[in-house]
Image (cartoon, rainbow, N blue to C red):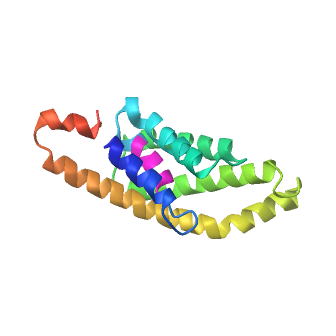
Amino acid sequence: MIIALFILGIGSRLVPHLPNFVPIIAIALFSGAYLNKKHSLWVPITLYVVSEFILGLHDIFLFTSLSVLAISILGRILRKRRGMAVNLVYSLFSAVLFFVVTNFGVWLVGWYPPTLEGLIQCYVNGIPFFRASIVSNLVYMFILTSVFNLVTAKVENKKFKFALLTN
């Protein structure tokens, strides 16, 4: 499972894609909710850091990394309430969390004037990227959970269930 998440997460960032239409947020949420506790935090943060080193670090790296970690922790809360409707709410909240934290980082590092107006303008200018994040998060979370549910239903042999890393 970890290999599949890394291929999806890193691969999707290396191929041409719409801005912010990548599965990183969904993978972080999914990992927290579906992987065992041992893997639920290090998988998404490692995936994110590796992909950033490949693409090149940026000055809001700390904010984006902390967002990925926070979303993974949020996924651990989701673990107790998994279901289609709950996944939808958590997916939306994850996109909002990522948007709020990373845009605050953009403003804080000086891409906009250090004023309330600058902060507001930063968030307003981020709205097109936010829309793509919401849609990609919903799409990828649906795909991840659907594939996971199909695979776990097919894996009846307990000696192969370890590969799913779920508990």
Residue 8 x/y as whole percent: 40, 54
**For residue 28: magenta?**
yes
Residue at image position (64%, 70%) is 128
Is 152 placed left or right of 12 in the picture?
Answer: left
With respect to residue 155, does 117 lie above or below?
below
- The residue located at (34%, 55%) in the rendering is 144
Of 137 and 9, nearer the camera is 9
Measured from the top left, where is residue 49 in percent x and y? 55, 42
Quadrant housing the N terminus = top left
Quadrant where the C terminus is found in the figure: top left
Residue sitting at x 67%, y 51%: 102
> What segment carries the magenta color?
23-31
- Residue 90 seen: no
Query: Which picture quadrant has residue 66?
Result: top right
Residue, far top: 38
Relative to 109, residue 137 above or below: below
Residue 141: quarter of image: bottom left
Q: Is residue 127 above or below residue 4?
A: below
Tell me the chief SS of the magenta region. Answer: helix
Residue name at image x 21 percent, y 55 percent: 150
Q: Is residue 13 visible?
A: yes
Q: Is residue 41 magenta?
A: no
> Residue 51: percent from the left, percent from the top?
53, 48
148 left or right of 10? left
Q: Position of residue 54 (x, y in %)?
A: 55, 48
